[in-house]
Amino acid sequence: MKEIILKDLKEKIYEHVTREGLKVYIWVNDKMKSTYMTLTVPFGSIHTNFKVLNKNYKIPNGTAHFLEHIKFNVDKDTTAHDLFKKSGGEANAFTSYKLTSYTVYTVSNVKENLNILLDFVYNPYFTKNMVAKEKGIIVEEANTELDDPYSVSYFEFYKQIFSKSNFRNEITGKPVDINKITLEDVLNSYNAFYHPQNMFLIVTGNVNPYDIVKTVEENLEQKEFPKYQEPKIIKPKEEKNVTQKHQELNLNITSPLFRYALKIPKNKFKNITEKELAIYLYILGQMSFGVTSSFREMLREKELVSNFNGRFTIVDDYVILSFFAVTDYYKEVEKEIDLKLTNYVLDKKDFERKKKAEIANLILKYDDVTQVNEQIQSELITNGKIIDNMKDLYEKVNLDKMQEIIDIINHNYSKATMIVKPNKND
Amino acid sequence: MTYKTYDCNSYRIHTIKENKFKTCHLEIIFRKPVVKEDLAKDSLLVDVLTENSKKYPTRQELMLYLEELYKTAYWGLTSKAGNTMMLDFVLDFIDPIYIEEENYLENVLTLPFEMLENPNVINDEFDNKTFKICQKRNILEAKSIKEDGFRLSVTETLENLKNSPTSYHTMGTVEEIESITPANLYEHYKKLFKECTCDIFVIGSLDMDKVVEIIKKNFKKRVINKEVLSLNVDNEIRKKALIKNKNSEFIQTNLNLLFNITDLTAYEKNIVFNIYNYILGSGGITSKLYQEIREKNSYCYSINSMYLKYDGLLLIHVALDNKNKKNAIRLIKKVIKNMALGKFTNDDIKDAVDNYVMSLNLTFDNQVAILNNYVFYIFDNLPLIEDRIKMLKEVSYEDIVKVAKKLKLNTIYSLDGKEQE
């Protein structure tokens, strides 16, 4: 078993790859009572078009989430929840844009709970009946989202920014998508992606890493897996420009909202890794638009906003700089943002303070079994590996490089704005 | 884990020394009985007192200082536990052993008391700019209830409990917030120190004698107030359940069934009812309500059964297609009746106890949860986790049937969604 030492954080992560190809990561904290286990497949809502052995598959939006729901069925009369109830495991699952993850918390019977987790996820039991039954439940889940004006305006805004990318679509799918999903879609997705070689298990908490690996090896040894066919994701080529420059919506809100986004091609940022870019953009976002920024304070002083935030997000081949404001004065807010983007001032003291605070935060992350698990998961999905020199990366962040990044960002990129007003009858 | 209380005359400090976390957590809790006319002021006051202070007169200056203190977080919240109002000031900070600065602990612990005792006040009025920012935020928050079908339906369900503290909005109504001025809020602020009881809780791997010394040096509350506060609200039982429907713009219908829970003993209130509720609906997908409404009939994504312990109420909420509402009401009533008829098994009890014990054990890994356990141990004699676990394991089938028979339907409230295709 390999040990990944996280330099300067005094932390260690065990890494092991089973004979079947499942990657296992373990973080031990013997002061904790609990253990958190996640079995994750990099198959999420954006993966709706893929190729296996020269055959193309196109599945409806929301299929990854649908599969997550019905995966809990073990046989006609039993669900994984029934089994975890007996073994003292608290099981759940979630689907995001890029992944589906099955999770279990426990304070006892780690081995038994781990076996149930592996057994139910690697049990290819799906029927037409369960697909039909689950549709009603998931349509209601999607309707709950459609009753949330912030969620609706978020996805409508992403539809405005992206013309092709699946980031524009709801993770659950809309009711009309959900009703299209068939047993065949579920089976094709499961067979393509749910293979140990394409998945990883993360165990964090009060465990013996050697016991974990032994349990996993023994469990998988009992199972038969077909040859992994390495599905290829077919990613649509996203347009450089936003789909729609401006949009106005009326929703069930009580105060008007304003959304603003710039779509910056990622390739504008040269000689920098994606991780480094993410760190620079995070610090820049905090300095320029965060709670300590003069810009935010100015908007509040002028009583232009009652809530405001701005941040950078890397979405596929684009860096999205987005702002959200609760405001009655969206035109003035837009002008102020445009002005700010041509007028960055780098404050050395503020820059160093932010770096110092972020480094302290890195230490704090290793304090909670859930947070550590999520941190490892995020690194594996984003970078394909655990970054062992995170503290170094933060310490190396410097003003010259930050200035180079700032020079790239201005308000001349393709821009989208959205105004959301209260429904007329409110 | 070592618990210790320090009586400082006008307030008490409760320390929990625990060395498994890298952060520390402090809460300053002021308590008083719920007074309807004061609720809006209570919430706004907490907001204003944590927004900035005399020393850090803008939000930006305060946030920069918190960042200097290695991203220390400081915020306030108000909560209504039955008949008691709690005004809570919370500080989260990194354990000093990770910090090289010598005065870090003193600096970080001084901050909340300095802010409480020296707010941004000019001529006996809160700074007008700060006041307006916070007032607007509170108004928006109060209005935003209408944006959320769950919150709106629950609020409107409880509003039907006339003249009960349970029916009051924790942050007051929009009109009540609008009527507050910087001057009358300052008058209200002065009462905080005079009329409220005060307890301070600290958890972390800290030298607690030093912590107490720093707090005593910085917190000069002089008025001793040891009023015994009762948390419990006695909500009236209706002769006939109230049934109310209202149309809404939401897609889903938000349906609530509210029940009085009558005459629970302390053991039933703290222990047995939790197991009953776990089997009924709070225990997730294997609970009776989930099985009946979601798994057998696909009517909903989730159904919640909330035990409002200090209000003596049980609230069941489900969001669903309006066409399934009548059936859902019938099925919920059937599940409640079956529980009272004892239609559950010893296996159900064992699973509920095991899982409830597990969730209590999970709280040992969360310092806020540990601290909260001590908060209600002090305020309500709630047995500590270890004692509760022992008591939970003794819960019998008869105990659960007995509490299941103590439910009485109070209200069926439905915020009807639009017709779906």
Image: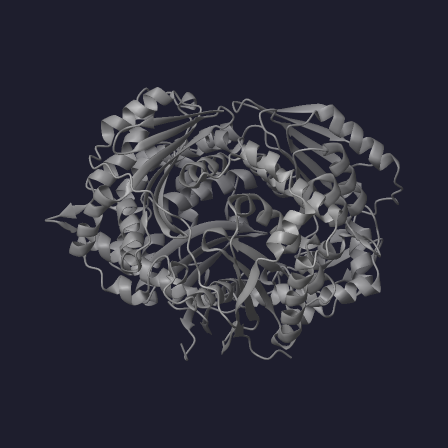
Compared with B13, B46 (above or below) is below
Taking the spot 50% from the left edge, 67% from the top edge, the residue there is B149
Q: Percent from the top left, x then y, of residue A146?
A: 56, 68
Q: Percent from the top left, x then y, of residue B417?
A: 55, 75
Q: Is residue A109 left or right of residue A420?
A: right
Q: Is residue B253 left or right of residue B196?
A: right
Q: Is residue A403 left or right of residue A76?
A: left
Give the camera-side residue of A212 and B3.
Answer: B3
Number of marks: 0
Which corner quadrant holds the N terminus of chain A?
top right
- In the rendered image, the residue lying farthest to the left is B123
Q: Is residue A241 visible?
A: no
Give the camera-side residue of B296 and B356.
Answer: B356
Residue B305, by quadrant, is bottom right
Q: How is the image coloured?
A: one colour
Which corner quadrant holds the C terminus of chain A?
bottom left
Q: Percent from the top left, x then y, of residue B298?
A: 71, 66
Q: Percent from the top left, x then y, of residue B173?
A: 33, 64
Give the camera-side residue of B83 and B176.
Answer: B83
Residue B14, by quadrant, is top left
Q: Is residue B48 visible?
A: yes
Residue B331, by quadrant, is bottom right
Give the camera-side residue of A117 and A343.
Answer: A117
